[in-house]
Amino acid sequence: MTAPPAQTQYYHHGRFRVAGGVLPDAITAYRTYGDPGNPCIIFPTSYSAKLDGQARRVGENKALNPKKYFIVTFATFCNGEPSPYNGPYFPAISYEDNILGVKKIFMAFGFSMGGQQAYHWAVVFPDFVERYVVICGSAKTSIHNKAFLEGPKAALLASKDFEDGHYKTNPERGIRAFARVWSAWAYGQSFFRGKEFEEGGAYPNLESFFKEKWEQNFLGAWDANDMLALLETWYTGDISIVRHGGNLGACLADIKARGLILPCQTDLYFPPEDSIMEGGHLKERGRIAVIPSTWGHMAGTGANPEADAFIQGEVMRFMEEPL
């Protein structure tokens, strides 16, 4: 049973300094599930995710159980909740800019960019975060990952309707190009040979997949400047900048919270090799479990039942493990 979407609330930070300048009235959109007296789990959004989508992972039969925990889902700056502000002049945002005031966190939980942010919670608040779960994410955005991000970014910037960010209507041509460059990396190669594309499957051909599903994910809910700003946060993600001057191994070794790292075996953004390398520095404070799925990065979204059953089982077991 999935929890129904809660009411979105808005926290006004007032003037708020971020990596690239100052926001005159920074706003964080968030939703809560459960009793505030229960242990708190924070669940930030990933790239292209909205608060409605976060509800998929909240439910009485899931790890994020609102009967047992107080769950706070919140929108990462530039995810479009609230509406875009200041177009191409929006200042650069880092992961640590998205860390909210905290008293005690039972667990920071996130997928993709949300997983990278979960790592940041454990580093920024070492005495207040007990556990963290990283699904298809990393402590530092790799060179390989950055090379991928340059592709869709270049497609959008070069489109004739982007107009250097000063467009009057959302640049559909550029967003469609952005989405198509993105698509081949999102799923594992085996996904495109699977049942979705077999005769009688969901999509009769690749063009149908692009137009009916993949491009719509970006066109329907995203502003092009927001897409680029959030991409920059991902691109520059590195927990070691926060505490250890760029020494990633030392930063990982110093994390006090207990961690569960869940890469997917076919993920092309955050391949399991990266997680295994990073996990070697966590020692006894971290555990890695590789998701066995052909869905690539998208295995971590909760959309594939088999992959999600594996994730739910690992997370539930992790939540019962002693600190």
Image: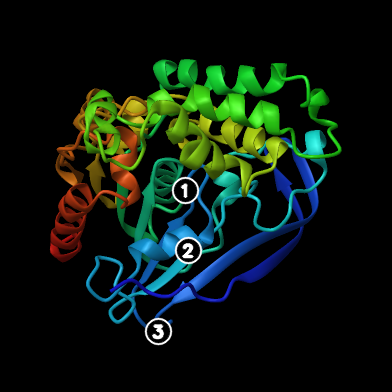
Question: In the structure shown, which secondary structural element does the residue marked by tag 1 occupy?
Answer: helix
Tag 3 residue? 35
Question: In the structure shown, which secondary structural element does the residue marked by tag 2 occupy?
Answer: strand
What's the mark number on residue 73?
2
The amino acid sitting under disc 1 is Val
Percent coordinates x, y for residue 51 in the rendering:
52, 61
Q: Tell me how far mark 1 sits from mark 2, CA to CA.
A: 19 Å
Mark 1 crowd level (few <14, some 14–19, many ≥20, 10 Å Cα): some
Q: Tell me how far mark 3 sits from mark 1, CA to CA.
A: 26 Å
Quick one: 297 or 270, which is closer to the camera?
297
Q: Is residue 93 left or right of residue 169?
A: left
Question: Considering only order in the chain, which callout, 2 or 3, is on the residue closer to the N terminus?
Answer: 3
Question: In the structure shown, which secondary structural element does the residue marked by tag 3 occupy?
Answer: loop
Q: Residue at x 72, y 66 (%)?
A: 12
Q: Tell me how far mark 3 sits from mark 2, CA to CA.
A: 14 Å
Percent coordinates x, y for residue 244 in the rendering:
45, 31
Q: Is residue 11 above or below residue 7?
A: above
Q: Is residue 260 left or right of residue 234?
A: left
The amino acid sitting under disc 3 is Asp
Q: Residue at x 18, y 40 (%)?
A: 291
Tag 1 residue? 124
Mark 3 crowd level (few <14, some 14–19, many ≥20, 10 Å Cα): some
Question: Considering only order in the chain, which callout, 2 or 1, is on the residue closer to the N terminus?
Answer: 2
Mark 2 crowd level (few <14, some 14–19, many ≥20, 10 Å Cα): many
Quick one: 155 or 75, which is closer to the camera?
155
The amino acid sitting under disc 2 is Thr
